[in-house]
């Protein structure tokens, strides 16, 4: 066999593995290189979910930050977000990402005012995500995702959007902040594993 053929075969062997059925499957590490997990989080519940997803699928983890952070005070942020939702104001982002490097994007956000938070609207409006796979995930205070997944779909023209994941997080209004820890984190991990299987995302383990 010519030497160059051996080289090509060796490279292919490194790139592809075989599963137990003998079918060729792409190596997980190569998939995760093109995966971005971007999230907005204030009291860290969504951040913990993002970290669990990264442990399961690999990829780059990025926190979405604003040029001008929201106020610390809960009532003040609720008021500002309500105004931004009403006027359609898109808060400028500090986070800048070369989106062309990724083909799968996990998009995490808390429910704010039963909607997609304005910074996510900024992110989706600022990037051409057509042709990419978008996988939304959410935490909330008990009222669910609201219109968050629907708006993601509306703002993401030409994307392939997979079924989102939503889980109860904290209740900042009542002084309850990070709750996805300890046993709740273990439960969340199991729920995430089952969701990833459902939406057919390859995991590292
Ligand atoms: C401005 C603001 C508005 C919120 N609005 C809602 C809401 O409409 N429904 C809900 O279930 N939770 C609401 N929450 C609670 C968060 O969705 C919940 O605490 C979430 O887990 C926070 O995620 P984080 O810890 O990643 O910031 C709101 C929180 C904030 C700060």
Image: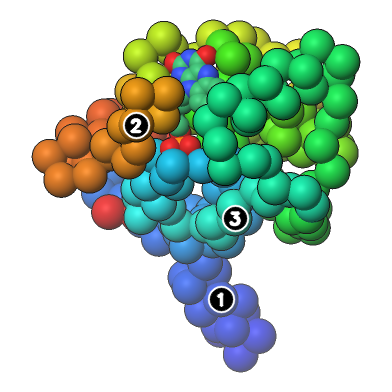
* Residue that numbered label 1 is attached to: 11
**Rendered residue at 56%/11% (across/down):** 114
Taking the view exactly as shown, the residue that stands out farthest to the left is 183
In depth, the one of 4 and 94 nearer the eye is 94
Q: Is mark 2 within 8 Å of ligand 1?
A: no
Q: Secondary structure at mark 1?
A: helix
Neighbourhood count class around disc 3 (C-alpha, 10 Å): few under 14, some 14–19, many 20 upward: some
Q: Which mark is nearer the camera, 3 or 2?
A: 2
Q: Which mark is residue 175?
A: 2
Residue 131, given in percent of the width and then of the height, sits at: 77, 33
**Rendered residue at 86%/18% (across/down):** 88
Q: Which mark is nearer the camera, 1 or 3?
A: 3
How many numbered tags mark residues here? Answer: 3
Q: Return the disc, 3 or 2, that comes first in the chain's sequence.
A: 3
> Does 48 sit above or below residue 76?
below
Q: Secondary structure at mark 2?
A: loop
Q: Which mark is nearer the camera, 2 or 1?
A: 2
For the residues bearing labels 3 and 2, Cβ distance under 8 angstroms = no
Q: Return the disc, 2 or 1, that comes first in the chain's sequence.
A: 1
In depth, the one of 114 and 148 nearer the eye is 114
In depth, the one of 144 and 58 nearer the eye is 144
Which quadrant, please, contains the C terminus?
A: bottom left
Q: Is mark 1 within 8 Å of ligand 1?
A: no
**Rendered residue at 41%/9% (across/down):** 143
């Amino acid at each position: 066999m010519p030497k160059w053929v051996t080289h090509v075969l060796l490279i292919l062997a490194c790139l592809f593995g075989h599963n137990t059925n003998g079918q060729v499957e792409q190596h997980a590490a190569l998939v995760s290189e093109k995966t971005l997990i971007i999230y907005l989080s204030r009291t860290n519940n969504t951040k913990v979910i993002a970290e669990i997803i990264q442990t399961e699928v690999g990829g780059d983890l990025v926190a979405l930050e604003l040029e001008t952070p929201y106020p610390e005070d809960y009532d003040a942020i609720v008021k500002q977000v309500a105004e931004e939702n009403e006027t359609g104001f898109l808060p400028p982002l500090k986070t800048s990402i070369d989106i062309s490097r990724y083909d799968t994007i996990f998009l995490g956000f808390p429910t704010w005012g039963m909607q997609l938070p304005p910074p996510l609207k900024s992110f989706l409006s600022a990037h051409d995500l057509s042709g990419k796979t978008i996988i939304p995930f959410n935490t909330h205070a008990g009222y669910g995702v609201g219109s968050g997944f629907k708006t993601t779909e509306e703002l993401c023209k030409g994307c392939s959007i997979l079924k989102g994941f939503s889980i109860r997080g904290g209740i900042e209004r009542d002084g309850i902040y990070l709750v996805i820890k300890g046993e709740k984190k273990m439960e969340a991990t199991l729920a995430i594993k089952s969701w990833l299987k459902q939406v057919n995302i390859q995991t590292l383990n």
